[in-house]
Image (tube, grey):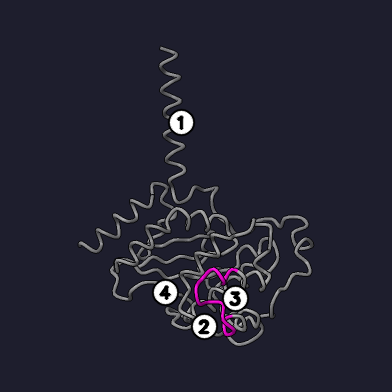
Amino acid sequence: MARERLAAEREKHRAAEKRRRALIVGASVVCVLGLAAVVGVVAANAGKDKGSASSGPVVAPSGAQGKDSLAVPVGQDGAKSTLTIWEDFRCPACKAFETAYRPTLHELVDAGKLRIEYHLVTLIDGNLGGTGSRNAANAAACAQDAGKFRDFHDVLYENQPEETDDAFAGNDKLIQLAGKVEGLNTPAFQKCVRNGTHNSWVEKSNQAFQAAKFGGTPTVLLDGKNIYQDQTMTPAKLKQLVEDANNG
């Protein structure tokens, strides 16, 4: 009996671990506000190409929508479901979400069933120092100007550095990654990145994130409901919710 109970307990543990890995978030898998700065991060990243300071006017990227034009839309305006994502390109939890959910999100968007509104924030810059969150978000906004936001967005997450490595602060790095998206690495894109054209817009988006008092990134809302807090959520469940909304 003891051996059977032990085997049952092990199986229960394995099942629980499998479910945990499938969830979009556990309390520990999120980039949260108020993290203590990591000693030496700022010094280690000193001297990198930080780009222009964002003291200029707020310039929204082409096609930005919503309040103060802070949302980058992906998908058809007529889609019955809208997913709102607040994210930081330096945030490892954001990468984990994107890695797990990207195929499902692409499928639903391409089918016209889901529209995504991306809001870009600079949480990790604030926590650890540096400008990689801001510069990557500016570069993504420059890609939006070129009509290639989604592809470049995915490339940034696929090439995300370690959280404490402010590699995205380097404009040369961002321009190099743009070469992975066909037709993006143009003189106009390079100028937009190096000039920090959308830096002030990114900072305004981050201010909106702080004002909304979200706990961390990513924050994921399906038609206004925070689904990132639902620990039973999986890509399959999200797909079913969107399918139900379209069938209803």
Whichever of labels 4 and 2 marks the residue nearer the N terminus, that label is 2
Front residue of 31 and 180: 180
Q: Secondary structure at mark 2?
A: loop
Q: On screen, 247 above or below 69?
A: above
| Count of numbered circles in the view | 4
Amino acid on which the number 4 mark rests in the picture = Pro
Q: CA distance from mark 1 to mark 2?
A: 48 Å
Whichever of labels 3 and 4 marks the residue nearer the N terminus, that label is 4
Q: Secondary structure at mark 3?
A: helix
Location of mark 2 (residue)? 60
Q: Position of residue 46 (x, y in %)?
A: 78, 67
Quadrant assignment for the C terminus: bottom left
How many residues crowd mark 4 within 10 Å: few (<14), some (14–19), many (20+)? many
Q: Are marks 4 and 2 in contact (CB under 8 Å)?
A: no
Amino acid on which the number 2 mark rests in the picture = Ala
Q: Are marks 3 and 1 in contact (CB under 8 Å)?
A: no
Magenta range is 177-189
